[in-house]
Image (cartoon, rainbow, N blue to C red):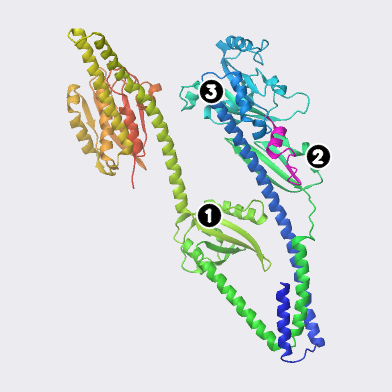
Amino acid sequence: MKDKILNIAGLAENRTKNTAPLKITHSNLWRALCFLLPSLLLTVVAVFYSIKTVDESTKRGFASNCDEIAIKISTRLHSHAGLLRSSSALFAATDKVTRQSWKALFKDSKIDRNLPGIQGIGFSLLVPKKDLQEHINTIRSQGFPNYKIYPEGQRDVYSSIIYLEPFSGRNLRAFGYDMLTEPIRKKAMELSRDSDVATLSGKVILVQENNNDVQFGTLMYVPVYQNGMPVNTVDQRRKAIMGWVYSPYRMNDLMNGILGKGDINHFEGINLKLYDDSLSDKCLIYDSRINNPNQIKGKPNQALSFPVVFHGKKWILYFDEYDVPVSYLENKVIVVLVSGILINVFLFLLILTLLNTKKNAQAIAEQLTAELKGNESKLRAILDNSFDAIAVEVDGVWDMCNAATLQLFGCATKEELIGKPFIDTIIPSEQDKIKAYTQNQIEGLSIPSPHISCGVKADGTVFDLEVSISVFIHLNKQHVLFILRDISERRKMENELQEYTLQLKKSNENLENFAYVASHDLKAPLNVVNGILNLIDNGKGMPSDTNDLELIRMAKIAVDQMKVLINDLLEYSRVGNNREDFSNTDLNEVLGYVQVLLKEKITQNSAKIKINPLPVISANKTLITELFMNLLNNALTYHGKNIVEIEVGFSEEKNAFKFYVKDNGIGIREKDFEKIFIIFKRLHSQSEYGGTGIGLALCKRIVEAHQGTIWVESELGKGSTFYFTIKKQD
């Protein structure tokens, strides 16, 4: 900047040499001084603005440091959860985990190096009341003659810490402790058991504490389930629970391990308080000032709070910063001050010279004006060619906007926006959120980040909108710069991806259950055939007598049973892969076709079937036919001694059709309502009622392929009514 001013002054000097000798008059001198005084005033303003910028930079640095600490804490909690989850895998890998193998696991984990600050890794075993004495005898036989579960008392079930490494020092006090007797620990253990995730307890005092250096603590739990038992539902997980892998944490030790031995001293002036669930003194579980009293130097000049949520458990990190001396006579401020003085001096000399060369001054002014207009044109071209909508708000109304903004809101001219409230372009339900977001950005209460909202186009169309805000001062007025993006397509893709992920997870769960049960049921007829063939082979010849022929007949029945099972499995598997397009399907025709297929069975049972008028729906005709075929066939099969009566009908809802198939058969117990839709789950033996246990599972899969649900209402001995919905298609 200095060189440029010198060049300008030199140019002016050269021009004046070619015109007339420099003559400084009192009038020109006063004029130059009149310019110098306001210019010096602007320099002073620039210096104060630079000081303000330094202050704002300090605030941003504080927010950045706080965010870094919060990320470290969150990351470490997930690392601890991963360690406990890998430790629980030891129980899944072997039927018996010994004290020696647990100690080896702790040693191999190198926790002191990888996760400093952890108190240890333990295992708490669940002990039923009936097994209590046997359990105590077993542990005592391992070299602990004084072992017992405490606190003492009669309970239906006990838990006991039997493994805890390192098994020394404070940790010896936890050996045999029943954590289920303490409400805060019990709540976290039960939540971990029911949800099958790592959970944190609330604020506690660990049993490891003695009278020296008492600290608040917390514990993390991961459930351990018995091998081979299903854990797909909460009820199944409660039945399968065997114990918990857990880690106790003394909060001061934990935070020192996460943030370093010097606690948070490397973040100068910052103090951290950690609260459990809410900002109240009773929920305070860590305060960095306890270990670093020298940090307290006065009243905090700024503060922030961050929530850290871990599997439903919320910690609140509260940061404050005490006054830190800032040298304003360094870096940016001193540069502005010195540069301003130099510029003013050189401009004073330049103006003093140019006042005597009016012609040159006018030429320079014209040149500068042309450059400003050119820069303004370039800026306008950049804004109008930007893909992002860019707009400026002053005093709550639009002040300027580019072409992309008009296109975003469906406006033909700028007059439709300029001078009108910006908030009117946001749907009413989101306006308070946008106002709060804007105010927080203006006051610097939150870290700048895009905000997701919903905008309205000129024709009233609502769309997903991403809003980014920057605040600047121009001509002593506060201006708010908005960068706006239509993210409707992106949100649509995110929703579709989320829905696909949920479907994929559900498909994987169904596949695991399907593979396990299918392998069991397919083996059964094969085992029958194999046993019969062994009996015949032991006979040393061709079958000749009645017994051998009967064995062959039984083998044929088993093979036929497996053939039916395989065919049903093929039908079940085709549901997810059926690529037949949805089309308008007349269900009256479908039910007529189904009755033709079941004519023989209907005649055999003298069945009375009432088909109420049914609608035309958009569906996969093949799958819908299979659905009604299975439901009517079940009604014709499970009828008891009554004359079969079946009724089919529907009702129309806002977004779906609701159908029902009602019979007067043997009925179903309420506790079996969910079980009947699981593949291979049968309520009766083959001798009572034949079948493979796939039919209703197939029905459920067909209904879900049509984005519907299926359920049953029944009373044992009084018949059943199967309901299902089919979503209306656009």
Q: How crowded is mark 3: few (under 14 residues within 10 Å), some or many (20 or more)?
A: some
Which quadrant would residue 30 be assigned to in this image? bottom right
Which of discs 2 and 1 lies nearer the camera? The answer is 2
Say which mark, if any, is on residue 293.
2
Q: What kind of element bears circle 3?
A: helix
Numbered circles on residues, count: 3
Q: In which quarter of the image is the N terminus?
A: bottom right
Image disc number at residue 685: none
Which residue is more in the foreground, 370 or 438?
A: 370
First in sequence: mark 2 vs mark 1? 2
Q: How crowded is mark 2: few (under 14 residues within 10 Å), some or many (20 or more)?
A: few
Dot 2 or dot 3, earlier in sequence: 3
Please tell me whether residue 133 is drawn above or below residue 97 in the rendered image. above
Magenta stretch contains residue 268: yes
Q: Disc 1 residue type?
A: Glu
Residue 436 x %, y %? 61, 52
- Give the amino acid type for the residue marked by disc 2 in the picture: Pro
> Residue at the spot x=64%, y=79% of the render?
368
For marks 2 and 1, give the CA distance. Answer: 44 Å
Q: Residue 534 appears at what percent x and percent y? A: 28, 12
- Where residue 709 appears, as percent x and y from the top left, is 37, 35
Q: Quadrant of residue 622?
A: top left
Disc 3 marks a residue whose amino acid type is Phe
Q: Residue furthest front?
A: 540
Element type at marker 1? strand
Q: SS of the residue at dot 2?
A: helix
Q: Give the range drawn in magenta.
A: 249-271
Q: In x, y percent, where is residue 102?
A: 60, 22
Residue that numbered label 3 is attached to:
91
Which residue corresponds to mark 1? 466
Q: Nearer the viewer, mark 2 or mark 3?
A: 3
Nearest to the observer: residue 227 or residue 195: 227
